[in-house]
Image (cartoon, helix red, strand yellow):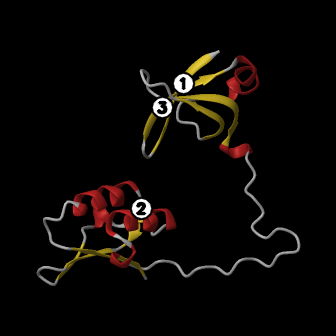
Amino acid sequence: MAVAVIEDLSGTLEMLIFSNVLSRMGPRLEAGAICVIRGRISAREDEEPTVICQDLETADSVKAPDPSPAGKEPAERKQPVSAVYLRFSSESDPSVERCSALLRVLSGRVPVHFYYADTATHLMAPSSLFCDGSEALRTRLASVLGEKNVVFK
């Protein structure tokens, strides 16, 4: 049995790896390796959450799912996002910082525009806040600002 620290963009967790998984995958595990983990979360009130690893694969051994299953037409591709527009009530709105934190985590090359309703001011965010334009980001921004205040074009 072993304990490892795993991390993603949101933080770190301890992971408990049982000997059957460790004996099979141990030689391929190394610091910084990208892995697919299957397991469960052990969350007790008096302890930090821990991942109980039931299976583990290195990312290079995982096959991507077939995008067009047999008998189905491929889904229509969405146009790539070329800009993101966010509307805030004012520059001092606390959601500005919350959204900026999300943009820093899901960074990319898509320009972001801020609009402050109280002054009718439109500003392009600095390149450090350019985003990836993902649906996950759109959903998170909408949960902070509301759907009508988030536009992906």
Q: Position of residue 106 (x, y in %)?
A: 41, 58
Crowd tier of the residue under label 1, counting other residues whose Cα lies within 10 Å: few below 14, some 14–19, many 20 or above: few
State which mark lies toward you, 3 or 2.
2
Quadrant location, the N terminus: top right
At which x and y percent is residue 10?
Answer: 42, 44
In-image side of 35 versus 127 (left or right) = right
For the residues marked 3 and 1, what is the alpha-carbon distance in whole angstroms?
8 Å
Residue 19: quarter of image? top right
Amino acid on which disc 1 is placed: Ala
State the mark number for residue 4: 1
Q: Residue at x 29, y 67 (%)?
A: 127
Q: Residue furthest right?
A: 71
Would you name the residue on which mark 2 appears? 140
Residue 131, image quadrant = bottom left
Which of the two marks, 3 or 1, is nearer to us in this view?
3
Viewer can see residue 29: no
Q: Which residue is mark 3?
A: 13
Mark closer to the chain start, 1 or 2: 1
Label at residue 92:
none
Instruction: Give me the residue at 28% from left, 60% from top.
Output: 100
Query: Which of the marked residues, 3 or 1, is nearer the chain's N terminus?
Result: 1
Q: Earlier in the sequence, mark 3 or mark 2?
A: 3
Please identify the quadrant where the C terminus is shown.
bottom left
Mark 1: secondary structure = strand
